[in-house]
Amino acid sequence: QSVLTQPPSVSGAPGQRVTISCTGSGSNIGAGYAVNWYRQLPGTAPKLLIYGNKNRPSGVPDRFSGSKSGTSASLAITGLQVEDEADYYCQSFDNMLTGEVFGGGTMLTVL
Amino acid sequence: QIPLKESGPTLVKPTQTLTLTCTFSGFSLTTIGVGVGWVRQPPGKALEWVALIYWDDDKRYSPSLKSRATITKDTSKNQVVLTVNNMDPVDTATYFCVRSQEHFITNFFDYWGQGVLVTVSS
């Protein structure tokens, strides 16, 4: 049972927009801690997509965007591409656990 | 690109101690705001944060490992070492070394090693 809750799977057609939610609580996202997002292609290490709720590292396309409100955060992907098929994870800090926490991951399927 | 590379055993027996080394380059663990740590992923499961050591030698551990984990750094060698004692089959996972950066009051992991699969079995 992950501290941050994500849908197990989402899907979309090429070119469409999808969103992935990440729901926390008052001891993590709701306490003001930022949310970060990672993408993990099969058999590879995760890669940072979004940090500080909405910031993209250099090299990440602007098709990826992040937002946060209250105790939740979202990752939006526009112009879906086949190569976007991967697992996506959110991450934040929890002050009750005094440590970093991840979501359970969301598998994105591009139909 | 900032390489981080994990090294250590791929097979340990239950109750044994696991020692993993992360060797990195391209940055210094004396830089303010920088940390190096470990994230693990059991086969087919989600990511789980394990431990972090910061530029100022502050250390944080996942409560799930209780007191079994220890993280240390050697800044002269650009290495971070993780030890986990009393290993159990549930500790079977790919262990990733990560670089951590502070952003306001939260850390993010901007560089990851390729990971090493550690299997706990007799």
Image (tube, helix red, strand yellow):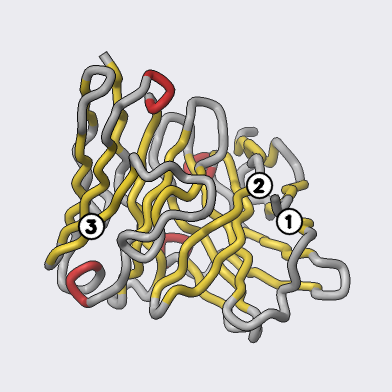
Relative to B86, does residue A83 appear above or below in the rendering? Answer: above
Pinpoint the chain carrying mark 2. Answer: B
Q: Residues within 10 Å of mark 2 (few under 14, many from 20)?
A: many
Distance (Cα) linking label 2 and label 1: 8 Å
Residue A52: name its quadrant: bottom left
Q: Which residue lies at the image location 39% right of the left edge and 41% below the top edge?
A: B46
Relative to B47, does residue B64 appear above or below in the rendering? Answer: below
Report whether B18 appears left or right of A94.
right
Q: Which residue lies at the image location 59% right of the left edge and 50% below the top edge?
A: B87
Report whether A1 appears left or right of B109.
left
Pinpoint the chain carrying mark 1. Answer: B
Distance (Cα) linking label 3 and label 2: 27 Å
Helix or strand or loop: what does disc 3 sit on? strand
**Image coordinates for residue B27, horizontal then vertical, percent:** 74, 67
Q: Quadrant of the C terminus of chain A?
A: top left
Q: Which mark is residue A67?
A: 3
Q: Which residue is mark 1?
A: B22
Q: Name the residue furthest right.
A: B76
Q: Which mark is residue B113?
A: 2
Tally of numbered tags: 3
Distance (Cα) linking label 1 and label 3: 33 Å
Q: Earlier in the sequence, mark 2 or mark 1?
A: 1
Report whether A81 appears left or right of A19.
right
- In this rendered view, identify the residue nearer to me: B30 or A111: A111
Q: Of the residues shown, which amino acid type is indicated by label 2?
A: Gly
Q: Residues within 10 Å of mark 1 (few under 14, many from 20)?
A: many
Q: Of the residues shown, which amino acid type is indicated by label 1?
A: Cys
